[in-house]
């Protein structure tokens, strides 16, 4: 899908119409930046989670899982730095009264420079045809170099100012770039202020004894505080990882772009504990590994890029995002962070408990360093969903809407359709459903003409339609139709399981890594 607002609107409305994502509490006009996953959405989300879990936990002997509680002792967040430093720089527009993240305004400005570069590339590719060399063009075209240098300089200055808490310079940068309010265009800005993103709540019944708690803003801390428990009980040897998936909560200032930035969301994180001094090597390895995981889904190499951070979080010595081309441009999908020994050391200090490892190979105790991979499940959902939604022109001049989800992730793998609702065809179709449902999520559909049913399943993202017709009664064969190519084949009923399995099996997809 092309990169524009209309396409994004289509993504949002399709997600609702086909039972993927609903606004939370919609009957009360919804709750901003909170969403519910509907009958298809919950399956897609579960399949993405499983695909991650298989690749990260079950395929690695030295990575184990964890499911830590959302509530944690409040000192956790003091130690982790979230109480003091988990802030976003916000700025208000005095005329429109709208509030923005100052860094996002600046990054969006740089994003526009990136779009200009992409346009130059597309123009040149058209002009030079087969002879076009993208790398050479990017490295030599003066206009492209100009845009790139300007963008880099802006991000560098912003990074430095934020690191030095020089919020006045962040405002100055917005003014110098002439950035206006995206809604009203007004350039009448307040000063930039810091805003803590954690949600607070209380534990306990009586007002005077109740304890102030936070809803966790990342799952990672549940892993750090359990480092020694897991290492000892699992007899884990460094290097090893602990992974978990679960909800996180952030009081986002700029909550927009559907499920891209939510206030309640799910993360899939893995903390990899390594010997100090080896973190750089592991950081590079995990960057490469995570990109391969994304590419295994076949959503197009050109849709991913790394963005190395200029501004490092308080805990990191290196950090990079895997960015994905969303309908609104390239944005962060996953972060890979070299977190040093910051977290474990901080928890040692605040808890008074040792969080160290005895390394028999070098006969030394040390606090391990950590390389983390952290991806938002909802953001991954949006990447997959938006990339898959396509409008196709057909040979007969009509168009079809098709959700070309990677079949390993598709909520329903096959729809079983009796050609007509009589003559014993529904009974045969039901029998196929009963048989296949042990292995796959399948559905039965007998309503409307078969062509309409095909279109409905195309739009819902079902990779296979299996039609039972009158010949089936004699030859035990059915028509299998492939969503992406619309190819139809006659196959025996007993072949169905292996045809579907071959196509949707996690192993076959992950082997592409
Ligand atoms: N433990 C490290 C950490 O939390 P992060 O970059 O703040 O790092 C990691 O978050 C990932 O979580 C992001 O790359 C993004 O995919 C996802 N994420 C963060 N904030 C989110 C939000 N408000 N809504 C949806 N996903 C979010």
Image (cartoon, rainbow, N blue to C red):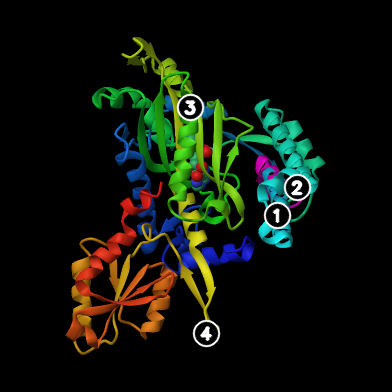
Query: Residue at the location (74% across, 38% down)?
Result: 154
* SS assignment at label 1: helix
Q: Earlier in the sequence, mark 4 or mark 1?
A: 1
Residue segment shown in magenta: 93-106
Q: Residue under circle 2?
A: 144
User: Looking at this rendering, what residue extends furthest in the front direction?
Assistant: 131
Along the viewing direction, whichever of 330 and 361 lies nearer the viewer = 361
Residue 97 covered by magenta stretch = yes
Q: Gap in Å between the C-alphas at discs 4 and 2?
A: 41 Å
Disc 4 crowd, CA 10 A, few/some/many (<14, 14-19, 20+): few
Disc 2 crowd, CA 10 A, few/some/many (<14, 14-19, 20+): many
Q: Gap in Å between the C-alphas at discs 3 and 1?
A: 33 Å
Q: Is residue 478 above or below residue 470?
A: above
Along the viewing direction, whichever of 161 and 89 lies nearer the viewer = 161
Q: Earlier in the sequence, mark 3 or mark 1?
A: 1
Q: Earlier in the sequence, mark 4 or mark 2?
A: 2
Q: Gap in Å between the C-alphas at discs 2 and 3?
A: 32 Å
Residue 303 covered by magenta stretch = no
Along the viewing direction, whichever of 377 and 76 lies nearer the viewer = 377
Q: Residue under circle 4?
A: 396
- Position of residue 262 measured from the top left corner of the image (x, y, whole percent): 51, 49
Judged left or right of residue 11, residue 505 is left
* SS assignment at label 3: helix
Q: Residue under circle 3?
A: 281
Image marks 1 and 2: residues in contact by CB distance under 8 Å: yes
- Position of residue 116 measured from the top left corner of the image (x, y, whole percent): 73, 53
Judged left or right of residue 63, residue 340 is right
* SS assignment at label 4: loop
Look at the image and tell me whether residue 185 can be seen.
yes
Along the viewing direction, whichever of 180 and 442 lies nearer the viewer = 442
Q: Residue under circle 1?
A: 121
Q: Gap in Å between the C-alphas at discs 4 and 1?
A: 33 Å
């Amino acid at each position: 899908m092309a990169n524009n607002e209309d396409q994004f609107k289509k993504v949002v409305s399709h997600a609702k119409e086909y039972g993927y994502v609903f606004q939370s509490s919609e009957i009360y006009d919804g709750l901003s930046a909170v969403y519910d996953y509907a009958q298809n959405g919950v399956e897609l989300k579960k399949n993405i989670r499983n695909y991650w879990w298989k690749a990260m936990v079950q395929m690695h002997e030295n990575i184990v899982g964890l499911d830590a509680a959302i509530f944690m002792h409040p000192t956790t967040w003091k130690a982790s730095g979230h109480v003091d430093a988990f802030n976003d720089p916000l700025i208000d527009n005095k005329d429109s009264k709208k509030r923005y993240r100052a860094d996002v305004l600046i990054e969006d400005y740089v994003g526009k420079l990136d779009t200009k570069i992409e346009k130059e590339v597309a123009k040149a590719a058209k002009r030079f045809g087969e002879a076009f060399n993208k790398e050479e063009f990017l490295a030599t075209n003066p206009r492209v170099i100009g845009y790139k240098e300007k963008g880099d300089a802006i991000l560098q200055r912003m990074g430095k100012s934020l690191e030095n808490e020089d919020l006045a310079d962040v405002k100055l940068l917005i003014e110098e770039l002439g950035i206006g309010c995206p809604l009203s265009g007004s350039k009448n800005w307040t000063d930039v202020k810091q805003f803590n993103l954690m949600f607070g709540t209380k534990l306990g019944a009586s007002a005077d004894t109740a304890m102030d708690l936070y809803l966790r803003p990342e799952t990672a801390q549940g892993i750090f505080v359990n480092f020694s428990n897991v290492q000892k009980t699992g007899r884990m040897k460094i290097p090893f990882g602990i992974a978990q998936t679960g909800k996180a909560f952030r009081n986002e200032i700029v909550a927009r772009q559907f499920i891209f930035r939510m206030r309640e969301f799910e993360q899939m994180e893995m903390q990899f504990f390594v010997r100090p001094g080896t973190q750089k090597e592991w950081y590079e390895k995990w960057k490469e590994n995570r990109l391969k995981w994304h590419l295994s889904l076949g959503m197009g190499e050109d849709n991913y890029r790394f963005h190395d951070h200029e501004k490092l979080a308080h805990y990191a010595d290196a950090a990079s995002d895997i960015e994905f081309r969303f309908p609104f441009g390239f944005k962060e999908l996953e972060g890979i962070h070299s977190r040093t020994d910051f977290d474990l050391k901080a928890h040692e200090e605040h808890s008074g408990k040792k969080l160290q490892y005895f390394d028999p190979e070098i006969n030394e105790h040390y606090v391990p360093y950590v390389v983390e991979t952290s991806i938002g499940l909802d953001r991954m959902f949006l990447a997959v969903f938006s990339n898959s939604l396509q409008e196709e022109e057909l040979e007969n001049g009509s168009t079809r809407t098709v959700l070309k989800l990677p079949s390993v992730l598709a909520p329903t793998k096959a729809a079983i359709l009796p050609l007509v609702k009589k003559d014993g065809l529904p009974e045969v179709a039901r029998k196929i459903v009963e048989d296949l449902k042990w292995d796959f999520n399948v559905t039965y559909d007998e309503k409307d003409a078969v062509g309409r049913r095909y279109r409905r399943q195309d739009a819902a993202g079902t990779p296979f339609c299996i039609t039972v017709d009158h010949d089936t009664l004699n030859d035990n064969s059915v028509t299998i139709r492939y969503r992406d190519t619309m190819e139809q084949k006659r196959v025996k009923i007993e072949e169905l399981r292996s045809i579907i399995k071959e196509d949707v099996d996690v192993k076959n997809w992950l082997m592409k890594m």
